[in-house]
Amino acid sequence: MIITIDKTAGFCPGVHRAIHKAEKELEQDNELFSYGSLLHNELEMQRLQADGLRLAEKDDMLLLNHKKLLIRAHGEPPETYMLAKTHGVELIDATCPVVKRLQQKVRRAAEEMKKVKGQILIFGKQNHPEVIGLSGHAMGLATVISSAEDIAALDLSRPVRLFSQTTMDSDHYNAFALFLDEEIRKYQPEPDFISHDSICHHVTKRVPALKKFAANVDVIIFVSGKESSNGKKLFNICLEINPETYFVSKLNELRTAWFEHVNSVGISGAASTPLWLMEDVAAKIKEMN
């Protein structure tokens, strides 16, 4: 049996950078705090927590005086930075550079819209950490939308600047932007509307490579945390191409029956799946056969 790990799988650059910063800090100090998980992978988080990473809540800022707080790849709203400065908390900023640039674009757009009574629309998930951060940079002008149905509540006679959460599906976003443009034209003969291409291209480029990978093996084992929306999306893409695709988050979820009379197995994962875990899965499959 040939077992191949997908070369395009594993940490995206933003997550890899955040993990590296966390590891570097934990080498120097045995205590580092983070608002929530750095990534949607339970086993990788257990590894980091064993080295000293601690999870904190927003209300814990008062308790973090003179301690270190890591800003995750998702980013944070400006108020987090202000609160940290007020309470003497040292920030280790691991905001993904793609997200950081997007935050700056949202800020500039908000400054422009403020002058003309316009609005900022963010296509994404209402309570996603990245969306909360982006909204915080919009100077109170942001409305989060996730479907065409949300448009009915908008005042489309006003100028609009549209952005997307970086990890949203590119086809869905483009279709939404096209529909929104058509709706705006009903209220504005000469639309003051700009749709910004703000989806991470690392995510979009993975899809064609993943489809090709899934098509060239008998079985796909997709390794991901159960809470990862990126993992769910990529798993379903694999499943569409190869019906013999199985989702696992831990080694004990592997089943011997999946590999009977199989010549080739491909192992892939989400943007939050560590390489070491995919390698462990490959080793376990070898043991089972």
Image (cartoon, rainbow, N blue to C red):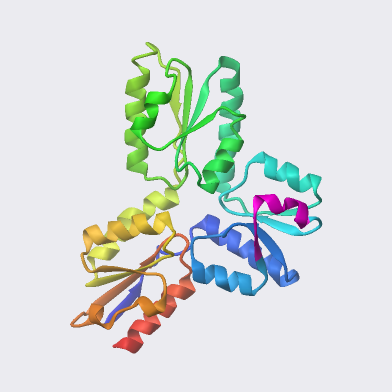
Q: Give x and y (percent) for residue 238.
A: 28, 61
Quarter placement of the N terminus: bottom left
The chief SS type of the magenta part is helix
Q: Is residue 178 visible?
A: yes
Q: Residue at x 37, y 11 (%)?
A: 189
Q: Residue at x 64, y 68 (%)?
A: 23
Q: Is residue 201 above or below residue 259?
A: above
The magenta segment: 54-64
Q: Residue furthest top?
A: 189
Q: Give x and y (percent) for residue 50.
A: 63, 74
- Report the side of 22 relative to 88 (left or right): left
Front residue of 287/125: it is 125
- Report the side of 191 relative to 20 (left or right): left
- Report the side of 207 relative to 219 (left or right): right
Quarter of the image where one finds residue 36: bottom right
Q: Give x and y (percent) for residue 141.
A: 56, 27
Q: Residue at x 36, y 26 (%)?
A: 180
Is 50 within the magenta?
Answer: no
